[in-house]
Image (cartoon, rainbow, N blue to C red):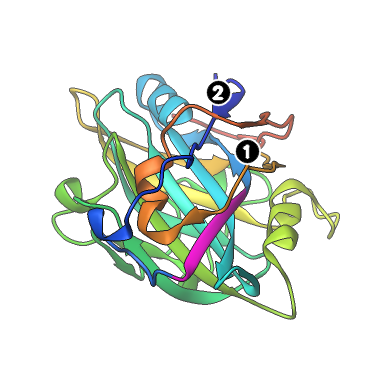
């Protein structure tokens, strides 16, 4: 349901950072190295298909003054234009992360650290079950339907990494089962609300990410501006999908 993704970023025309909202320091850039879609684990068929076709997260290295900050990784959550829907809570299960460094809100999106409930709805519908790490959670400020990630909107979360791990290690954790426990070493969960005309809700867990190499790093002041343009590199969807035990 989620086909191969093609996107391109062209920065051949010089653009002044002052022309666009600055969402981080001018010296900070983000280089995309991986991307993944999501599989529904709880929700009606119609609401599940919306998230599986529209929800996406890109994983990026963080560069400061052109130098890789190996101790950080950035996740950019996006909701493609389409059916009405709102990402309201974001969850992370284990992996390479130490804690949230910062949340960079797209226009129209306001998220804060912490989430209620503390675990993804439907977490026991997959095996092994999804067990969110509470300090990694974030959610839309109230009212969530207004401040969550709607179609055409994005949100970036920058994490500090633990034990010398890098952004590349984070992609590896999203793609592999190094612990041989039957699940990806890092899993991402999304709870969505206000889906479609019936305003349904649903929960999703990431598929498998693949590494890709973009043409140039993306300046922090332009990261949201260019993230939806057509593509210079390809990332194919992996074969891994969560084993869903029970979907309503």
Q: Which residue is denoted by mark 1 in the rendering? A: 207
Q: Does residue 237 appear to the left or right of 26 in the view shown?
A: right
Above or below, 242 against 92 in this view is above
Quadrant where the image shows the C terminus: top left
User: What is the distance, in whole Å, between disc 2 and disc 1 at their CAs?
Assistant: 10 Å
From the viewer's perspective, is 189 left or right of 147?
right
Seen from the viewer's position, the closer of residues 116 and 74 is: 74
Quarter assignment of residue 127:
top right
Horizontal arrangement in the rendering, residue 35 relative to residue 13 (left or right): right
Q: Earlier in the sequence, mark 2 or mark 1?
A: 2
Q: Is residue 17 left or right of residue 132?
A: left
Q: Check whether the beta carbons of the residues at disc 2 and disc 1 lie within 8 A of each other.
A: yes
Residue under the point 61% across and 53% down: 187
Identify the residue at horizontal 67%, vertical 78% (top origin).
162
Q: Secondary structure at mark 2?
A: loop
Q: Vertically, is 235 above or below 196?
A: below
Image quadrant containing the N terminus: top right
**Residue 205 rendering spot, x and y as whole percentages:** 54, 43
Q: Which residue is mark 2?
A: 2
Q: Position of residue 102 (x, y in %)?
A: 41, 72
User: Mark 1: which secondary structure?
Assistant: loop
Spot the residue most to the bottom.
Answer: 163
> Residue 227: image x %, image y %?
43, 41
- Observer-nearest residue: 220 or 89? 220
Q: Which residues are magenta?
A: 27-32
């Amino acid at each position: 349901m989620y086909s191969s993704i093609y996107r391109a970023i062209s920065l051949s025309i010089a653009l002044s950072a002052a022309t666009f909202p600055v969402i981080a320091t001018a010296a900070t850039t983000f280089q995309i190295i991986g991307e993944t879609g999501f599989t529904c684990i709880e929700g009606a068929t119609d609401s599940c298909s919306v998230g599986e076709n529209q929800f996406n997260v890109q994983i990026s290295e963080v560069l400061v003054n052109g130098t890789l900050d190996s101790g950080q990784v950035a996740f950019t959550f996006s909701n493609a234009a389409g059916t009405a829907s709102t990402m309201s809570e974001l969850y992370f299960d284990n992996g390479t992360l130490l804690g949230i460094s910062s949340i960079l809100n797209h226009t129209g999106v306001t998220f804060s650290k912490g989430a209620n409930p503390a675990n993804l709805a439907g977490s026991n519908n997959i095996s092994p079950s999804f067990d969110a790490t509470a300090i990694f959670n974030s959610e839309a400020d109230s009212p969530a339907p207004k401040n969550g990630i709607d179609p055409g909107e994005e949100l970036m979360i920058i994490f500090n990494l633990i034990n010398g791990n890098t952004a590349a290690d984070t992609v590896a954790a999203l793609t592999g089962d190094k612990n041989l426990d039957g699940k990806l070493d890092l899993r991402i969960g999304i709870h969505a609300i206000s889906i479609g005309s019936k305003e349904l809700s649903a929960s999703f867990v990431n598929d498998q990410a693949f590494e890709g190499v973009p043409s140039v790093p993306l300046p922090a002041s332009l990261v949201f501006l260019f993230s939806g343009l057509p593509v210079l590199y390809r990332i194919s969807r992996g074969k891994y999908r969560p084993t869903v035990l029970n979907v309503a």
